[in-house]
Amino acid sequence: MRDLLRQRTSLKEEIEILLNNQVKMEAEASAKYLAMASWCDRNGYKNSAAYFMKQSDEERAHMLKIFNYIMTVGGTAVSPEVPAVKQEFASFRSVFETALQSEISVTQAINRIVTQSRREEDYGTENFIQWFVNEQIEEEDNARRAVELFDVIGEDGTGRYQIDKAILKIGSSEE
Ligand code: FEO
């Protein structure tokens, strides 16, 4: 049955697996950001909590975008199982360092999909995934900027309060 269906779509199994893995990775990113929002909230960093809530929403939107694409091209989209995510962080700064590291991993996974799409001559998927290539440039830039704020503002005195305030402007032209 599965093979019969396979003949009715040009989606290769290898690409379908990579896309479903990406669905899972985006769902996991969404869950990670929720945990970061909660940590920031309970430690008094309300703006950062709001920032991570928004990031979490965006990751869910990414997940849905890929999920929908798999269905559109006749594949089997798999509702992802999300592994337990880290709820505690050593410091305010480490939350943002973890976020940056996570975005870098996502970029690498997206790049692997581009590479594999080309190898399999799946130009539809290559074209679809370009949106994510661009999105990752922006997301990595924002995550890097957040970590940078710890150095340019400094954490002493009211530093962390100022950093939390500055986080709000990340991604906007006001910064
Ligand atoms: Fe959808 Fe930030 O990775």
Image: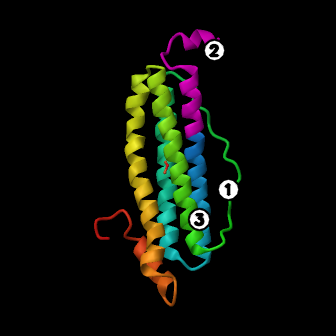
Looking at the image, which residue is at 44% across and 55% down?
140
Disc number for residue 85: 1
Q: Where is residue 91 in the image (x, y as percent from the top left)?
A: 62, 74
* Mark 3 lies on residue: 36
* Mark 2 lies on residue: 2
* Amino acid under disc 1: Val
Q: Is residue 120 above or below residue 169?
A: above
Looking at the image, which residue is at 38% across and 40% down?
131
* Amino acid under disc 2: Arg
Q: Is residue 10 above or below residue 127?
A: above
Among numbered discs 3 and 2, the one appearing first in the sequence: 2
Of residues 151 and 83, the one drawn nearer to the viewer in this rendering: 151
* Real-space Cα separation, disc 1 to disc 2, in angstroms: 33 Å
* Amino acid under disc 3: Met
Among numbered discs 1 and 3, the one appearing first in the sequence: 3
- Judged by its main secondary structure, the magenta piece is helix
Of residues 17 and 73, the one drawn nearer to the viewer in this rendering: 17
* Real-space Cα separation, disc 3 to disc 2, in angstroms: 40 Å
Q: In which quarter of the image is the C terminus?
A: bottom left
- Specify start and end residues of the magenta stretch as a single range: 1-22
